[in-house]
Structures are given as structure tokens and as C-alpha cells.
Image (tube, rainbow, N blue to C red):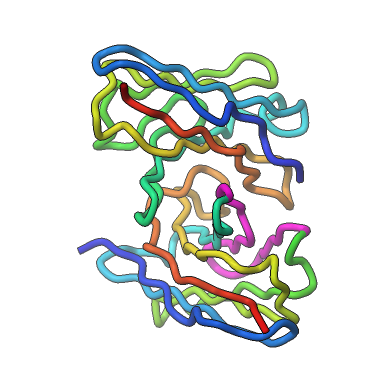
Amino acid sequence: QVQLVESGGGVVQPGRSLRLSCEASGVIISDYGMHWVRQAPGKGLEWVAGIWYDGSQKYYADSVKGRCTISRDNSRKRLYLEMNNLRAEDTAVYFCARDQSSSGDDGMDVWGQGTTVTVSS
Amino acid sequence: QSALTQPPSASGSAGQSVTISCTGTSSDIGGYDYVSWYQHHPGKAPKLLIFEVSARPSGVPDRFSGSKSGNTASLTVSGLQAEDEADYYCSSFAGTNIPYVFGTGTKVTVL
């Protein structure tokens, strides 16, 4: 079964940190770029961060730059998003997604179901 | 990184067609042929419908088609079916450091 499964979401206080994980099952991710995309309550999709197939290049949306770090462990088939200094506006469902290209710019063809992050005091 | 502009809603009767526009700038849609479209049923994983403006991944029906003119991309859904009722998002490459900028999203209703 082809799937990406996110974990690590939860309720966290403003200013704290959280690490999201995405595990691949039945799908190869080592040859492909990977991304995190989020959807705040009642809002649309927002690209958050992306990483090349080998981890050599990483990109971030302005809204999270300096506060988030994307990484991957291809040997474990996992993608990560370390989120620091969390803000209320980071509250969202976070999806991981596989790109069709190695550099990560050609459409995201495999998606997880998402993990929910709620930032609240 | 401004979001691409989509109409909030669109609708059509079953069997008819609906076209969704996605307007950007010369720095995103107008500058590259890397426009993709996604279907999202709330609570589920988004699904890739179109990539590289008009290409369809295997398994996506040819009822879904994409095009681009200048800074505006479009998705047409022909032969509307009940299961097409969902949110639709466009996205575009916007430069080396911004592989994706999404549209504001369009809710499609099948009447």
C-alpha cells in the first residue's frame, strides 16, 4: 500500500518546539524531492518547506524561515520538520508530500493524510 | 510569496463543464511551465490532477484538463460528476528558492 504517514502533531504552547515526522510505506522517496504543506483552519493550502532527494538543497516559505528546519533520512524512509518558536498562526494540518522530481518542483504526487498542530496557551 | 488568485467558488450541473482560473504574475505562472492542480476533499489527502500546465498523472481521467495563457492558468472539469465536488488548488513554481506557491482555492459544487 502506497502511503505517507505523518506523526508528531499535538497541542503546544506558543514559543515551544515540535518535530513532525513522515514515514513512507510502499513508496520510494529516496529519489524524489519532498515537501511539507499545511492548511490552517478554514484556509487554503500553503507550501511550507521542501528538500531535494539527497538533502543537499532545502527551501522554506517566508512565514517559517528561520524557525523551521526540514530534513530527511532516506535509509529510514523518513522526512522531518523541526518547528521552533511556534506561533498561533502555525496552527494547521501539516501534510508531507512527495514530488515527482528529484529537485522538488514538478508536482506532488503522493500525499499523507496530515497531522494536526495546535499552538495555544 | 503572494498566493495565486482563484475564484472562491464555481459550480455546474452534472454532466456539464466548469473552468477554474488561477492568476499569478510573470514571476510565477507567466515565467514557467510548472503549473499543477490539486483536488482536495476535506479531511483527505490532496490529489495531483495536472502537472506541467497540462500533463495528467496516470489514473487521472481525461475529464480534467489544464492550460495556460500569459499569467493565468486554467483547469477545466468536463462531464461533472458528484465526486468532483471538492476544493481545487493551483500551484506554480516561483523561482529557485520557491518551488511552490499555491492558489487561494476554489470550491466546486455539482448542482
The quarter holding residue B24 reads: top right
- Out of A103 and B16, give the one closest to the viewer: B16
The residue at the point 69 percent across, 40 percent down is B3
Check if residue B61 falls in the magenta segment: no
Position of residue A55 measured from the top left corner of the image (x, y, whole percent): 59, 70
**Left/right of residue B106 with respect to residue B83 in the rendered view:** right
Tell me if residue A62 comes above or below residue A85 in the rendering. Answer: above
Check if residue A61 falls in the magenta segment: yes
Position of residue A3 measured from the top left corner of the image (x, y, whole percent): 30, 64
The quarter holding residue B63 reads: top left
Position of residue A27 measured from the top left corner of the image (x, y, whole percent): 30, 63
The quarter holding residue B25 reads: top right
The residue at the point 63 percent across, 60 percent down is A48
Image quadrant holding the C terminus of chain A, namely: bottom right
**Left/right of residue B21 with respect to residue B30 in the rendered view:** left
Image quadrant holding the N terminus of chain A, namely: bottom left
- Out of A77 and A62, give the one closest to the viewer: A62
- Out of B105 and B31, give the one closest to the viewer: B105
Residue range corresponding to the magenta coloring: A43-62
Tell me if residue A70 comes above or below residue B101 in the rendering. Answer: below
The residue at the point 28 percent across, 37 percent down is B58
**Left/right of residue B22 with respect to residue B106 in the rendered view:** right
The residue at the point 37 percent across, 56 percent down is B43
